[in-house]
Amino acid sequence: MQTDIQIEPAVIVVFGAGGDLTQRKLIPALFSLFIEGWLPEQFLIIGLDRVQMNDQAFRQHLYEGVDRYSRQGKVNTQDWDRFASHLTYTVADFTNPKAFDLLSEQIAAQEETWGQLSNQIFYLATPPTMMEPIARLLHHTGLSDNRERARIVFEKPFGHDLESARALNNTLTNFFFAETQIYRIDHYLGKETVQNILALRFANALFEPVWDRRYIDHVQITVAETVGVEHRGGYYDQAGALRDMIQNHLLQVLCLIAMEPPVSFGADEIRNKKVDLLRAIRTIPCDSMDWSAVRGQYGEGQIDGKAVPAYRHEPGVSADSNTETFAALRLCIDNWRWQNVPFYLRTGKRLPIRASEVSVVFRPVPHQSFPRSALEGWQPNRLVVHVQPDEGLSLRVQAKQPGLRMRLNPADMQFRYQDVFPSPSPEAYETLLLDILLGDATLFMRADQIEAAWQIVDPVLEAWADNPPADFPNYSAGSWGPEAAEALLARDGRHWLAPIVEEKRGKHV
Ligand code: BG6
């Protein structure tokens, strides 16, 4: 496929190119962009890492990743050979200024060969401790000087808490890069279904009139995973579910559901509206932490009929770890639209199914005119965004059950991506990488957004650190988390809704 967008020549430098993210996500995404005609003719991908490898070994390593993880399926070797000729690898120590001098020379030489200037994307697929040193050396080498062309990309986690995120933002933007050059990734924002929340809310006249406290009872956001910590125990044990998922992915989804309508789709306008929303979220007071926040850690159990070990027995995890693998929050938004409408967020590892879903639950009708006997199966209206799997939307309405008596039962009106749009959706990283090449920062986190999100979770992190859990592990792998998570909603007279994919499988929470 050839595209009509002109993308300028680009050098993409990946720090941490020997790692998992590069092999599983970045290169498969760049390969897809390449074969679909989105990359410019003149592009070079420079991998940098400490691992000893030559170009050939690097290409082979990436080939295996693309063959395994690309949405394009098995690699066509001709396509791969054309793509691989743009890949090169250098062994580098990211703390050594010489490595950056060499990089600078390599980029200059490439531009000379092309006879054109390029945009440079510095992608940090590295542990968080390397972010600042790399940015510092890029700056010292002059590689960050061109504010139009040089862009730096940070993977999450961005900071460990509010203080560290603020310090990192200050150092980066005061000394090394302008904010407009910085792209902080939250890959959830690259997902089609997450972006579609904007289309749903602001391209349809139907929803906005009922999108507030008068018609909406509450909102639930669930991101459930069946996987454990896989090979990332070392990182995860320092992070936990609140930092790993809620501070970023779930809060970003919440922003899109709850923000005010933007005036335009400019990057700053969307980001301003999201920051307004984050700042309206009420800080959870420390004396009502138990009413608003729940943590859990999985013990051993079964997933899909297979025995799986407890979190504390996972590789890289401390045997007496108190890190949470499940977190749930009850959040309130102090603005006119959402007064008294709770937002319940939950996420966990080793839950029974993989499902990310947003349920907007509407209030009951103000007066029930149907006889009691008709209402046994009654449920409130519910608009569900299926983020994954089975991407789409469903709207639960009441319908008359066919028959000679009046009985109401819920029925779902459904939109499934795969039925309506036959072409496959791009991976989140494809969308995000293309936006970086184009210099469009709409889907990336600005410094103030990151800090506003930390401001929400910081009091919970502090309260949890001050009061280590006495009951971990408190849920079995394969269950829906600790009992306290149910109690969080039960106190409000509500319960967690089974994700629709699970309902369909005939199970129940
Ligand atoms: C990452 C987290 O950001 O998102 C992981 O660090 C998590 O722990 C992953 O598994 C989930 O992403 P997705 O796209 O599979 O929902």
Image (spheres, helix red, strand yellow):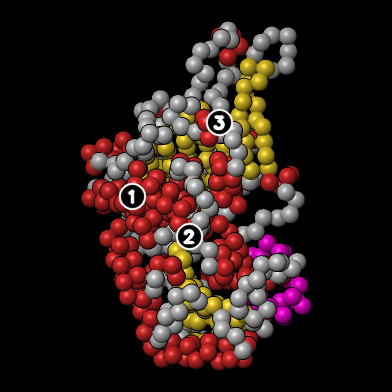
Pointer 3: what residue? Answer: 382
- Pointer 2 local density, CA inside 10 Å: few below 14, some 14–19, many at least 20: many
Q: Counting residues from the N terminus, which is met first, the one under dot 2 or under dot 3?
A: 3
The x, y position of residue 12, in whole percent, is 55, 77
Picture coordinates of residue 398, whole percent (x, y):
62, 22
Q: CA distance from mark 1 to mark 3?
A: 28 Å
Question: Disc 2 vs disc 3: Cβ atoms closer than 8 Å?
Answer: no
With 151 as the anchor, is 312 left or right in this view?
A: left
Q: Secondary structure at mark 3?
A: strand
Residue type at mark 3: give it. Answer: Arg
Q: Looking at the picture, does residue 451 appear above or below residue 476?
A: below
In the rendered image, residue 465, in percent from the top left (x then y), is placed at: 26, 52
Task: Identify the main secondary structure in magenta.
Answer: helix
Name which of mark 2 and mark 1 comes first in the sequence. 2
Asked whether residue 229 is in view, the answer is no
Where residue 457 is drawn, which disc sits there?
Answer: 1
Q: Does the magenta run of residues contain 62?
A: yes
> Which amino acid, by three-letter code, is at mark 1?
Val
| Residue at left offset 38%, top offset 34% | 336
- The stretch drawn in magenta includes residue 88: no
Q: CA distance from mark 2 to mark 3?
A: 29 Å
Residue marked by disc 2: 444
Where is residue 213 shown, x and y percent of the image? Answer: 43, 29
